[in-house]
Amino acid sequence: MPRRNLRRLLKDEFTGYSLPVFRQDLMAGLTVAAVALPLALAFGVASGASAAAGLVTAIVAGLLIGGLSGAPYQISGPTGAMSAVLIVLAQRYGLEGVWVAGLLSGLLLLLIGLLRMGRFISFIPAPVITGFTSGIGLIIAIGQLDNFLGVHTPAHDKALHKLVAYFQVPWTPDGPTLALGLMVVGLMILWPPKWGARMPASLVGLVLTTALAQLAGWDVATIGSIPTSPILAERLRLDAVPWQHLGDFIYPTLTITALGAVESLLCGMAASNMTGVRLQANQELVAQGLGNMLIPFLGGVPATAAIARTSVGIRSGGRTRMTGILHAVGLLLSMLLLAPVMGRIPLAALAGILMVTAWRMNEWAAIRFMFSHRFKTAMLAFTVTLLATITLDLTQAILISTFLAGAIFLSQIASLDIERQPVDAAKLRQRGLEISSECPHVEVAFITGPLFFAAVGNFNEAFAGGRPTQALILSMRGVPLIDTAGLEAIMQLKEHLHRAGGHLMLAGVNPRVRVMMERGGIVDAIGRENFFWGSDEAIVEADRRGCPFCARPARMAWPRGAADEAFTPVDGEEDKD
């Protein structure tokens, strides 16, 4: 159970915890807080809520989700991908819709974790995730054009329609607003990496642009009032939950759940490669679920693990989950002490941060790899997912991407290779096997790949023609799994051979496949004497039986009820293999 996992994680993590380790966690936590502060404010605004909502989300996620996380390095909060989903939801249902969908998705994440289904989230192919991430980046950038340029264009719930609107209505950028946005973008691009290790460019950009706007007296849009309490006045209340209309939130809930789970587990995979510490996926989903169930009642927006903040914590020397907790404490102190100052931050500065973040969200290395090597399936998956994300409702994009992921998965694993070869008696005799004839009646078919419903067509086609044979040996060492459709295909092949006067023999059957054959009655139907450890033994036996077959039992056979053990000799003979 996840509770036992958490107890074991905490014990392993904090055994031998000391003051020097705490100092490392403290410094790493403060560094992450410096990175997270501008991002929390920006993503709160980008979600259709407020900067304060983003700050509350980061604080609660750092404390609760970080404290219950499935790994010591995970740091959660509002993210760019989630904000792109939430802005559409806020435009359609208002903040109450965001909170209700967040609450329901938290409950669903909790159930997925408790039912230990976290591993299924990782089945989504990488090109689909890359395409969705790039689409999210475009949505964020397009959604921030108004704040970046200082204009007001009609609102749209689809990014492509919003972009087209800029070519349909007259607008003129506001000079001071554009200057502030470009200033932040320039700082984030040109800021030396070695400086960023101590002071993030995004935070420097906020400070400088806020000071410039105040000193120059520019009348630009700002964040506005920041409350000094982690419990916002605008928050979800139980009496405001539209219980009778919960069905309207099914698709948004599934979207937030899928995105939150995938992003959190991807963050864990990336951090695991950096640290060598494996993420406990189910415990992480439990933590994400509990955190997202609480956040709406405090006025925040749905959270997920954040790759940028997590990697900063690791590179800064963070050792335990205290890094995430201390980062949340730092954000809370900022809220209590610096609220009046943060309220004067120009929205253009936040837009600049989001523009650069949207660009950096793209997995450029993966994109260049798949297109430079012309992997057609990956290119198609990436392109379709990207276009669906920016042209359709994000819920529809998730569904299309999920269907595409399933189709790609089936296409990849349905590749069944079957190589039919006549027996080369001369070569077998050179290897020391006693073959008394040229074996013209024996043929071996080497099968590689899973034999399930999507591959049965290839299997049947491979054996539809060819010369007649008295003994067909299926070498199945390369078949890792089989389903009922595969069992039926083998049974039909056996009956076809039997009607033609031939026999079917199987060699190298995987233990799991053998169990399925036992359950399906295939072993008894074909005959246990026709199952062999390897194709060599089957060929020798087929040659010994001659043509047509005699009824004598095989020398090597599977022992009854021992599908996961090697073959044992029959009739007291020793296994010479």
Image (cartoon, rainbow, N blue to C red):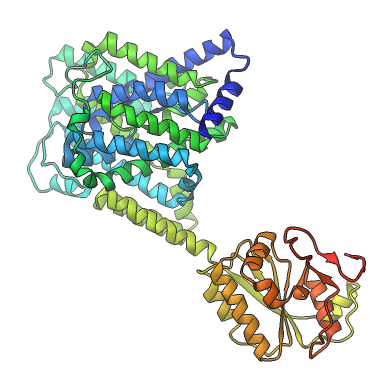
Where residue 549 sits in the image (x, y, percent)?
Answer: 79, 87
In-front residue for pair 491/43:
491
In-front residue for pair 365/189:
365
The answer to whether one can see residue 41 in this image is no
Query: On the image, which quarter does residue 407 sit in?
Result: bottom left
Please state if 161 lies on the left or on the right of 81 as rendered: left
Q: Quadrant of the C terminus?
A: bottom right
Please state if 35 lies on the left or on the right of 154 as rendered: right
Q: Residue at x 76, y 65 (%)?
A: 560
In-front residue for pair 476/334:
476
Say above or below: 309 vs 507. above
Where residue 436 sits in the image (x, y, percent)?
Answer: 89, 84
The answer to whether one can see residue 142 in this image is yes
Where residue 570 sits in the image (x, y, percent)?
Answer: 87, 70
Say above or below: 556 vs 125. below
Please state if 192 lies on the left or on the right of 443 as rendered: left
Where residue 473 sits in the image (x, y, percent)?
Answer: 72, 77
Please state if 72 lies on the left or on the right of 401 as rendered: right
Q: Residue at x 44, y 21 (%)?
A: 324
Q: Residue at x 33, y 50 (%)?
A: 398
Q: Residue at x 11, y 20 (%)?
A: 219
Direction left: furthest residue = 170
Query: On the image, which quarter does residue 545 sit in?
Result: bottom right
Label total for image: 0
Query: On the image, which quarter does residue 540 sit in?
Result: bottom right
